[in-house]
Amino acid sequence: MECAEAREHLSDLNRGHLEAGTAEAVRAHVGQCASCAAALQREAEVRALIQARAPRYPAPPALRSRIQAAMAQDAFGGPGWRALLRSHPWTVGSLAGAIAVLLLVWGGTLWMARDPVSRLAAQAVAEHVEYAKEMMNRPIPDPPALVKELRSQVDFSFEPIFRGDSQVQLVAGLVSDLLGKRAAAFVYRDGSGRYTTLFLMPEAGTTIPAENRMPIETFKPHHRVTSGRHLLLWKQRDLACLLISDLDEAEMAAMFLKIRKAA
């Protein structure tokens, strides 16, 4: 695969939207091309930063209808999007807002480039939020079958996984790409509808910060809060483990023990 073709797929690779064969081909190219590897990392950083920080507002019904009408016109060769953009009242305030978001992304990217754990945390939190939205209406899978299927989809081995109990259910297992590194993601939901995501990935290249360690019995994982969610990061044998949760700090510690002691 050449660089031009690989770069067309970088965004979909980070989002886990590529077919298995295409994803493997892109990863193989990125593993041998420093330029494309850097591009993949930049794309992941910017995407994670925008998802974590940029405000989101629902479109008013009238604007939604105009967009749908413009899309329909485009499909049949009409003026479509050009007419919609010309008719949109771009005010000084809306332009200033757009510039502010761009400056936020630019400044945040420079800061995050100096802190690889922050980059990892930002993308993982964004993935966690997406998973929570996707799992709300899905039926509960069979945990043993789910774990077996995920083992066959990743190129590394992992230990026995916490499969849920009377308080927490394992609701999904997915393959993720965190900053270009393949990861196994396990999504849990408690009785109150709060979600926790466990990411497992090869530990090579992952540094656990020495500061902000949270004592949990005999363990001391790194702890931080990102976008209002608690995050724990630790190494377990040859894996880096990242836990992100909607739970409070005490509940997060209890969840950590369930996961840590299941292995």
Image: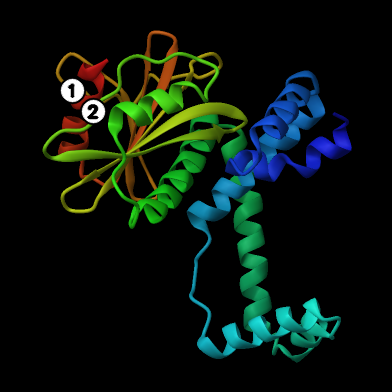
Could you tell me which quadrant the N terminus lies in?
top right
For this rendering, which residue is in front, 202 or 90? 202
Horizontal and vertical percent for residue 230? Answer: 31, 40
Q: Which residue is mark 2?
A: 256
Q: Which residue is mark 1?
A: 216
The answer to which quarter of the image holds residue 147 is top left
Residue 207 visible at all: yes
Measured Cα–Cα span from mark 2 to mark 1 = 8 Å
Q: What is the count of numbered marks? A: 2
Q: Is residue 214 above or below residue 46?
A: above
Horizontal and vertical percent for residue 157? Answer: 45, 13
Q: Nearer the viewer, mark 2 or mark 1?
A: 2
Label 2 close to label 1 by CB (< 8 Å): yes
Give me the residue at 74% from left, 41% from top: 9
Q: Is residue 64 above or below residue 170?
A: below
Residue ranking furthest to the top:
237
Could you tell me which quadrant the C terminus lies in?
top left
Give me the residue at 42% from left, 53% from top: 134
For this rendering, which residue is in front, 201 or 45? 201
Horizontal and vertical percent for residue 164? Answer: 21, 33
| In-image side of 12 versus 213 (left or right) | right
SS for dot 2: helix
Give me the residue at 22% from left, 18% from top: 262
* Three-letter code for the amino acid on which mark 2 is drawn: Phe
| In-image side of 38 versus 187 (left or right) | right
Give me the residue at 81% from left, 23% from top: 33
Q: Is residue 112 above or below residue 144?
A: below
The answer to which quarter of the image holds residue 179 is top right
